[in-house]
Image: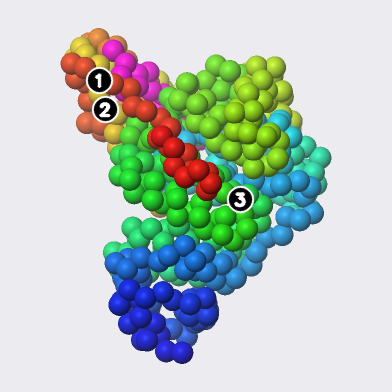
Amino acid sequence: MRMVDLIEKKRDGHELTTEEIRFVIEGYTHDEIPDYQVSALAMAIFFRDMNDRERADLTLAMVESGETIDLSDIRGVKVDKHSTGGVGDTTTLVLAPLVAAAGIPVAKMSGRGLGHTGGTLDKLEAIPGFHIELSREEFASLVNESLIAVIGQSGNLTPADKKLYALRDVTATVESIPLIASSIMSKKIASGADAIVLDVKTGAGAFMKDEEDARRLASAMVAIGNQVGRNTMAVISDMSQPLGYAIGNSLEVQEAIDTLRGEGPADLLELCLALGSQMVFLGGGAASLEEAEELLKELLTNGKALEKFKEFIRNQGGNPAVVDDPSLLPQAPYRIELPARQNGFVSQMIADEIGTAAMVLGAGRATKESVIDLSVGLMLNKKVGDSVKVGESLVTIHANQEDVADVMERLYAAIEISAQAETPLLVRGVVTGVEGSKA
C-alpha cells in the first residue's frame, strides 16, 4: 500500500477502505508517513469529503492510536457531554449534579480552559478545597457511591488526533467536517463513554459561525457515534451572545448554584434541560425526552439537584458551605459598572469579543502558561432584546484593579444598542440519530 495512491484515490473522489484509513493513521502516528503526504490527504478530504463509514473508520483508527479508558467497573450507562465551546458556558456545573440526581452516573473527565475563561476544572477549583486529583480507583468508587465525580483528563489518548490537529491548523483544513467530527468523537470514545450528548454551538462566539455548518457537524458526529456503538444525540444551540449572565470562574460557579436552586438565567436553564433530557434518556432514566425533562424539573424544584451538588463538592474535598454562602468563593476587590451611552434595545452582544474582555481581566488563559485569576470576570446586566436607558449598567466588571479602561472599550465595541431588537432563539435544533434535525 502506498500513500501516494491513497492521496490520488481521495483526490479523485473515491472511498478509502477501512484498511487504507488504518494504514494512514498507524503510519502517521509512528512517523512512518511524512507530514506533507498527510497534509495532501487532509486537503483532498476537505474538498472531497468522506461518507459515514469512512468517518467512523477514521474515528476508530484515531481511538486505537493510543490508550483508552475502561469505565466498565462503574455501574450503569455512562453518558458523556461535550460542548464545542462558547462564552459563559456553565452547563457542566449544572448538568453533572442534576443528571446524577436523576440516577444516571456522571463520570466526567474534563480539561482546563485556553481562551475566554477557565475550563470546568478551573471553575470547580474556585470552590475552596475542591481537588480534581483522584486516583482511578477513587474516581470509580465515588461514581458508584454517589453517581458523580469529575477528574482531569489523563493518559495518552488519541495521539493521532493531536498530530493531525496540529497539521490541520497550519494547512487550512481545520474546517473540514469529517476531520472535526472524527477529532471530537475519537476523544469522547477513548474516554470510555457508553453514550454521548453533544452541544454544538453556532454564532459569533462559536467555532461554527454558520448555523447550517453547525447542523452538518452535529449530524456527522451523531452518525459516527451511533455507527460505532455509542448512542449519540446532539443539541444545536446559539452562541451569538454569551450563555447566562456570568463570565468568569467564581462567578460561573455562583450562577450554577443559582440555576440548581431554580433561580438562574432562563437561557442557561433551557439549555441544561435540553442537554440533560438527552443524557437521562440515553442513560435509561426515562422512556422519552419529554419524561426526562419533567423529571429534571422536579429535581430542581424539590432541592435534590442542589443537595447532589453539595455532596459532590464534599466528596472531592471542597467546602459545601459555598452553596448557601457564595461569598466564600473568591471575590474580586473592585466592581465597576459599564453604563449605557444611549437609549434603546440591546441588539447585539458579540460573544467572542466579550469573552476576550474577560480574558484580559485575567479570567482566562492567553497561553497554556497563563495563570487564571479565579475571582475576576463579567456579570451581564442586559441581554439581547432587553431595553436599556442611558446610564443603566450593561455589565458589572469584577476586577483586581481600578483601571479597566481597555476592558470597558472592548465591551462597548462588542455591545450594540438599536431602536429595536429581538431575542435570539437559543435551541436551534436537535439531532437524535433517528428523527434527524428538528427545529
Q: Which residues are magenta?
A: 372-387
Quickly name the residue at label 3. 231
Q: Residue 172's image quarter?
A: bottom left
Kindly identify the amino acid type of the residue bearing the numbered disc 3: Asn
The answer to whether one can see residue 245 in this image is: yes
- The residue carrying pointer 3 sits among few (fewer than 14), some (14 to 19) or many (20 or more) residues within 10 Å by Cα, namely many
x then y, percent, for residue 186: 54, 61
Which mark is nearer the camera, 1 or 3? Answer: 3
In this view, which residue lies farthest toward the front? 435
The answer to whether one can see residue 356 in this image is: no
Quickly name the residue at label 1. 421
In this view, which residue lies farthest toward the bottom? 1
Q: Nearer the viewer, residue 29 or 266?
A: 266
Is residue 85 depicted above or below 378 in this figure?
Answer: below
x then y, percent, for residue 69: 68, 60
Is residue 166 depicted above or below 71 in this figure?
Answer: below
Quickly name the residue at label 2. 348
**Which residue is drawn at the image coordinates 30% and 44% (left, top)?**
210
- The residue carrying pointer 2 sits among few (fewer than 14), some (14 to 19) or many (20 or more) residues within 10 Å by Cα, namely many
